[in-house]
Image (cartoon, helix red, strand yellow):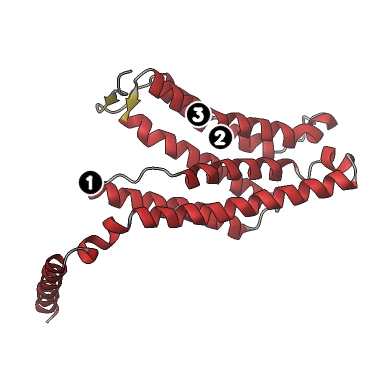
C-alpha cells in the first residue's frame, strides 16, 4: 500500500476534511441542545427536558466519534492534506473545550479541572510548534490517546449524571453514577498531566539543546552564551 499523499497545496475539501468541518460546525448545535432554553412563546414538551442531557450526550459522542472517521478517510484514500493536519486537532480541542466550558456553566464541573485540561493543550501545542521549528516531530504517545478516551468518557458521564432519568432510577444508581463519573474524570486529569510530562520528556533534546552532549559542545555553547551576554551588555550600556 502506498504512503498517504500529502497535499502541500493547502486547502482541499476532500471527504476527510469535510467530516472535520462538519464536526466543527455542529459544536454550536451541541451547546444549544445542552444549554439553550426554548423561547417563551414556544414551550418544549416536558419529555424534551428529561431527555435533553441524553440528546446532548449523543451529539457530543457522535462528534467525538467522527475524529476516527476523518483520520480513516484521509489514510485510506491517500488524501492527507496540510489543511487537514491543521483542522483535525483544532476541531478536537474546540469540541473538548466547548464541553468543559458548558459543564462549568452548568455548575457541575470545577473550573480548575477545565483549566488543567485546556492549559495542557496550550502547552503541548507550544512544544510541538517549537519542535517543528527545530525540524523535529513529537508524535502522539499512548498516554495522549488514553487521555483523550478518558476525557470523552468523563464528559459524557458529567453531561448525564444529574439528569432526571438518573435521579428517577433510584438512589443507588444515582450514587453509583456520581462515583463512576468523578473517578473517570479524576483519571482523565491524571492522564492529562502524565501525557504533558511525556511530551516534555520527548522534547527535552529540543528544549535543552546541546547541554547534554560532548564536552566540546558544552564548551562551544558556553562560549556562545558568553559572547551573547557581552553583546547584550553592549546594547544595554
Mark 1: give few (<14), some (14-19) or many (20+) Cα within 10 Å.
few
Quarter location, residue 90: top left
Helix, strand or loop status at disc 1:
loop
Please provide percent x and percent y for residue 6. 28, 26
> Which residue occupies 73% across, 34% down?
54
Residue 34 falls left or right of residue 18: right
In screen coordinates, is 137 left or right of 156?
left
Quadrant where the image shows the C terminus: bottom left
Find residue 60 and report its horizontal and vertical position in percent.
62, 34
Q: In front here: 171 or 234?
A: 171
Residue 39 seen from this side: no
The image position of residue 167, as x and y in percent, is 86, 43
Neighbourhood count class around disc 2 (C-alpha, 10 Å): few under 14, some 14–19, many 20 upward: some
Looking at the image, residue 79 lies above or below residue 211: above
Mark carried by residue 14: none
Q: How many labels does the image show?
A: 3
Secondary structure at numbered mark 2: helix
Please state which of the two labelled residues, at mark 2 or mark 3, is closer to the viewer. Answer: 3
At horizontal 84% and vertical 32% (from top left) the residue drawn is: 46
For the residue pair 71 and 163, the one nearer the viewer reads as 71
Task: Provide the residue designation for mark 1.
Answer: 135
Mark 2–mark 1 Cα distance, whole angstroms, equals 34 Å
Upstream in sequence: badge 2 or badge 3: 2
Residue at image mark 3: 68
Task: Evaluate if marks 2 and 1 touch, with contact meaning CB atoms under 8 Å apart.
Answer: no
Q: Name the residue under label 2.
A: 27
Amino acid at each position: 500500500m502506498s504512503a498517504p499523499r500529502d497535499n502541500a497545496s493547502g486547502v482541499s475539501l476532500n471527504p476527510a476534511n469535510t467530516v472535520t468541518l462538519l464536526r466543527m460546525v455542529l459544536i454550536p448545535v451541541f451547546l444549544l441542545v445542552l444549554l439553550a432554553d426554548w423561547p417563551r412563546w414556544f414551550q418544549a414538551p416536558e419529555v424534551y427536558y428529561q431527555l435533553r442531557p441524553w440528546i446532548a450526550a449523543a451529539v457530543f459522542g457522535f462528534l467525538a466519534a467522527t475524529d476516527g472517521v476523518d483520520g480513516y478517510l484521509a489514510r485510506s484514500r491517500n488524501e492527507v492534506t496540510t489543511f487537514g493536519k491543521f483542522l483535525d486537532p483544532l476541531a478536537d480541542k474546540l469540541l473538548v473545550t466547548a464541553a468543559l466550558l458548558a459543564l462549568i456553566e452548568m455548575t457541575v464541573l470545577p473550573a480548575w479541572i477545565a483549566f488543567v485540561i485546556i492549559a495542557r493543550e496550550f502547552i503541548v501545542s507550544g512544544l510541538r510548534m517549537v519542535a517543528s521549528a527545530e525540524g523535529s516531530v513529537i508524535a502522539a504517545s499512548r498516554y495522549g490517546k488514553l487521555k483523550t478516551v478518558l476525557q470523552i468518557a468523563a464528559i459524557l458521564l458529567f453531561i448525564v449524571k444529574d439528569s432526571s432519568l438518573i435521579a428517577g432510577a433510584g438512589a443507588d444508581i444515582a450514587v453509583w453514577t456520581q462515583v463512576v463519573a468523578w473517578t473517570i474524570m479524576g483519571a482523565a486529569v491524571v492522564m492529562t498531566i502524565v501525557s504533558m510530562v511525556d511530551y516534555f520528556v520527548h522534547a527535552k533534546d529540543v528544549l535543552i539543546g546541546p547541554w547534554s552532549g560532548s564536552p566540546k559542545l558544552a564548551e562551544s555553547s558556553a562560549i556562545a552564551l558568553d559572547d551573547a551576554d557581552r553583546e547584550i551588555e553592549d546594547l544595554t550600556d
